[in-house]
Image (cartoon, rainbow, N blue to C red):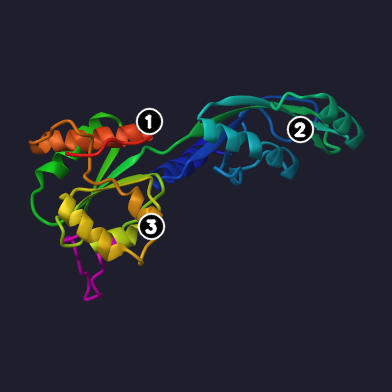
Amino acid sequence: MKNEDIFSFAGKLSESGQPFAIATVIRAEGSTLAKPGFKVILSREGKLLFGSLGGACPEGAIAAPASDSLKDGKPKIVRVHLEEAEKSMKEMHLNTNPDEIFVETFCGGTMELFIEPFQPRKRIVVIKQGGKDDVADSIVQIGGSVGLMPVILDLSDITVNDGSAARDPLEKFEFTKNDYVVILTKGSDDIKVLKHLTKHDPAYIGLMASRKRSSYDFKELKGKVKDSYIESIHTPIGLDIGAVQPSEIALSIVSEIIKVIRGSGSVSKGN
């Protein structure tokens, strides 16, 4: 297995916003097909995405530890014991250490693996209309400075190539559950955008609008989307820091997103 192959695959997963774990064999004893240096990539659910450890037995054994590592964000070391059925059952009964895994197989041997979780960089997706938008520009600057990945989605950016039908930028864009979406559509496309986002369930949706406009938007959405979805929308957007200038409004928005990311509970509203 070539390292550049697996890391290239990992890079593609990261770019697409998918979390994953890399499990590396760091020690092998006895009869094991996988040797030190062997690597595999597993999904959030523990599904093998790339690489091999020599068979389904050891690969299936690390599914749960990989999934747990992605949930708590902590790397871990596990030992997989490939034992005959009788010995494996006995050890499973006696051993309570979750990092010591016993697998029924005739292979024999033990593998020690280092499991490292990788969470994609969280994106702030700013949805705006055409033209200059100082708040959007400031969100890009501030968001990037705190380690987030700012992306501008301009709804006016419709391109037609070779006479093909124009596609709505909103439909072309690939949202993920790891996105933090800021809607700066100024009323014209609020409903369209909010309806579209119900298909993707992003981590955060914030709508920059007056209380009057957001109230109107929600009345239009009533009965067309779930009430819980409407209640999840952050508006007025941003933490209440008395923001006036575009850069201050952007700071309040990024601050609210950070508060949500850190799991600080309910968010104070108002701008």
Residue 16 visible (yes or no): yes
Q: Which residue has dot 2 on it?
A: 32
| Lower position in the chain sequence, tag 3 or tag 2 | 2
Q: Which residue has dot 3 on it?
A: 227
Q: Nearer the viewer, residue 99 or 163?
A: 99
Image coords of residue 115 (percent x, y) = 58, 30
Q: CA distance from mark 3 to mark 2?
A: 54 Å
Tell me which residue sits at (14%, 55%) in the image: 186
- Label 1 Cα neighbours within 10 Å, binned few <14 / some 14-19 / many ≥20: few
Answer with left or right where residue 146 lies relative to residue 115.
left
**Which of label 1 and label 3 is nearer to you?**
3
- Label 2 Cα neighbours within 10 Å, binned few <14 / some 14-19 / many ≥20: some
Quarter of the image with the N terminus is: top right
Residue 190 visible (yes or no): no
Q: CA distance from mark 1 to mark 3?
A: 23 Å
Image coords of residue 50 (percent x, y) = 57, 45
Q: Nearer the viewer, residue 86 or 1?
A: 86
Secondary structure at badge 2 equals loop
Tell me which residue sits at (22%, 38%) in the image: 238
Q: What kind of residue is marked 1? A: Ser
156 magenta-colored? yes
| Lower position in the chain sequence, tag 2 or tag 1 | 2
Q: Which residue has dot 1 on it?
A: 264
Q: What kind of residue is marked 3? A: Asp
Q: Which residues are magenta?
A: 155-170
